Image (tube, grey):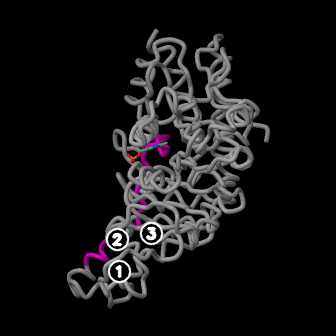
């Protein structure tokens, strides 16, 4: 598409936008009485308007039925989680049996490591991207320590080449192959939280398996953002959170994927709980854990119904919008427009103050652009916030801006670029 740097053009794109009605399904935060330009869906997605009803329905069920709510009513809680699996399987490209919804992301990462980090003899190392989200780094470090290894030795980090900010797929695959004899696990994020780089997960899974390792993905920034095909790509396991692009509330419920090829493997370790027990016998309360078949066998604790209600409100909107294919089509032009406008701001200013470190290639990014501010970075970020443009700040000089196709407009993006230009004048 050929973009133009005018408000008129932005308004025209909004008019043509097939998903434009979805903005009204979300509650947009205000700044000085006007809708803020909210570009922070990478950190916390906005609240769907319908959430209150979904939650209220469950509060009513609790009020009316109390403990019987597990078994009676329109949506008995015992099966409530099942209503999430259809939409989630579309978002993740997985079979419904390969998914379950539970806990929080980092907790799930640990539980999955219990099953899928299986160091044996020489094969005990984990390969991951350098600069992964801190929680993932801490999880990996503590897991290798738990098995008696030194993180400095047992964790291999793939870093960008000197002078570069993102990874080359070729380098990732080569490092996997070079360490083939020692790898127990390849663990990658889908999209790096800092740079916004989307990795070639299919190629990574293939290379990991060719090296004899298991392969897992943390999809915190990818789920609900870009189309995924976990089953087809043959990932062994994955986890995600629901509060970023899946708009399911602060600290919202997480989920896991386990590839069906592992269902029958009874050698896998798991930290079990009664909610993962085979459903037909769960209430016999018998000794000796027997897992439910499928990902549900990894469940540990009672379903948190209110968190699931938040999640469901948002997932139903994904279905209504036509799923990831429709959202992604808009996302590519929306983020492309922001990229174009940032280039225009630099041109108009006569200096490349804003350097986008996220790949230009659409196949290597989702909604987010990470922008390095070459001077007065924090002051510029504060100027944006004071003017109702909400992005987020990452030390030492990065502003992350994530236009989300569900609720952001081309006009939002235009206004953000205007503020980026004004900031250069204002914070001299
Ligand atoms: C957001 C995010 C987390 C946060 O994990 P919680 O357990 O939900 O606090 C972890 N890892 C990655 C890659 C993230 O982007």
Q: Are marks 2 and 1 in contact (CB under 8 Å)?
A: yes
Judging by the rendered image, the residue that carries numbered circle 1 is: 77
Mark 3 element type: helix
Residue at x-position 35% and y-position 44%: 33
Judging by the rendered image, the residue that carries numbered circle 2 is: 303
Q: Nearer the viewer, mark 1 or mark 3?
A: 1
Circle 1: is it few (<14), some (14-19), or many (20+) Cα within 10 Å? Answer: many
Circle 2: is it few (<14), some (14-19), or many (20+) Cα within 10 Å? Answer: some
Dot 1 or dot 3, earlier in sequence: 1
Q: Ligand 1 is located in which of the four quadrants? A: top left
Residue at x-position 59% and y-position 65%: 262
Query: Distance between the Cα atoms at labels 2 and 3?
Result: 13 Å
Judging by the rendered image, the residue that carries numbered circle 3 is: 312
Segment tinted magenta in the rendering: 36-59
Residue at x-position 50% and y-position 11%: 375
Would you say residue 313 sits in the magenta stretch? Answer: no
Residue with the most extreme right position: 2
Q: Viewer-proximal residue, 356 or 339?
A: 356
Residue 215 vertical position relative to residue 160 in the rendered view, above or below: below
């Amino acid at each position: 598409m050929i973009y133009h740097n005018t408000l008129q053009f932005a308004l025209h794109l909004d008019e043509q936008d097939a998903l434009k009605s979805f903005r009204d399904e979300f509650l947009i935060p205000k700044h000085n009485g006007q809708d803020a330009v909210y570009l922070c869906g990478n950190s916390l997605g906005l609240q769907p308007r319908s959430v209150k009803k979904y939650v209220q329905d469950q509060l009513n069920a609790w009020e009316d039925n109390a403990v019987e709510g597990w078994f009676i009513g329109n949506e008995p809680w015992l099966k409530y989680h099942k209503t999430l699996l259809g939409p989630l399987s579309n978002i993740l490209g997985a079979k419904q049996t390969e998914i379950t919804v539970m806990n929080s992301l980092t907790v799930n990462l640990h539980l999955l490591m219990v099953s899928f980090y299986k160091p044996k003899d020489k094969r005990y190392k984990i390969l991951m991207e350098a600069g992964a989200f801190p929680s993932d780094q801490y999880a990996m470090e503590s897991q290798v320590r738990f098995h008696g290894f030194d993180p400095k030795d047992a964790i291999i980090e793939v870093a960008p080449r000197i002078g570069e900010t993102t990874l080359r797929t070729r380098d990732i695959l080569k490092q996997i192959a070079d360490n083939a004899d020692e790898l127990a696990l390849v663990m990658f994020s889908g999209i790096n939280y800092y740079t916004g780089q989307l990795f070639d997960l299919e190629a990574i899974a293939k290379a990991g398996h060719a090296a004899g390792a298991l392969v897992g993905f943390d999809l915190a920034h990818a789920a609900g953002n870009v189309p995924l095909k976990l089953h087809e790509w043959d990932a062994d396991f994955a986890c995600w959170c629901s509060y970023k692009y899946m708009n399911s509330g602060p600290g919202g419920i997480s989920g896991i994927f386990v590839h069906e090829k592992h269902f029958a493997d009874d050698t896998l370790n798991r930290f079990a709980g009664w909610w993962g027990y085979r459903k037909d016998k769960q209430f016999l309360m018998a000794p000796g854990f027997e897992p439910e078949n499928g990902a549900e066998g990894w469940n540990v604790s009672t379903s948190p119904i209110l968190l699931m209600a938040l999640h469901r409100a948002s997932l139903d909107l994904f279905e209504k919008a036509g799923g990831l294919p429709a959202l992604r089509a808009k996302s590519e032009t929306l983020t492309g427009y922001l990229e174009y406008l940032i280039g225009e701001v630099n041109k108009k200013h006569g200096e490349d103050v804003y350097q986008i470190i996220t790949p230009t290639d659409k196949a290597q990014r989702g909604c987010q652009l990470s922008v390095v501010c070459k001077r007065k970075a924090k002051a510029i970020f504060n100027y944006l916030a004071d003017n109702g443009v909400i992005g987020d700040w990452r030390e030492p000089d990065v502003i992350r801006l994530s236009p989300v196709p569900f609720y952001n407009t081309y006009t939002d993006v235009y206004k953000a670029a205007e503020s980026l230009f004004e900031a250069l004048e204002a914070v001299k």
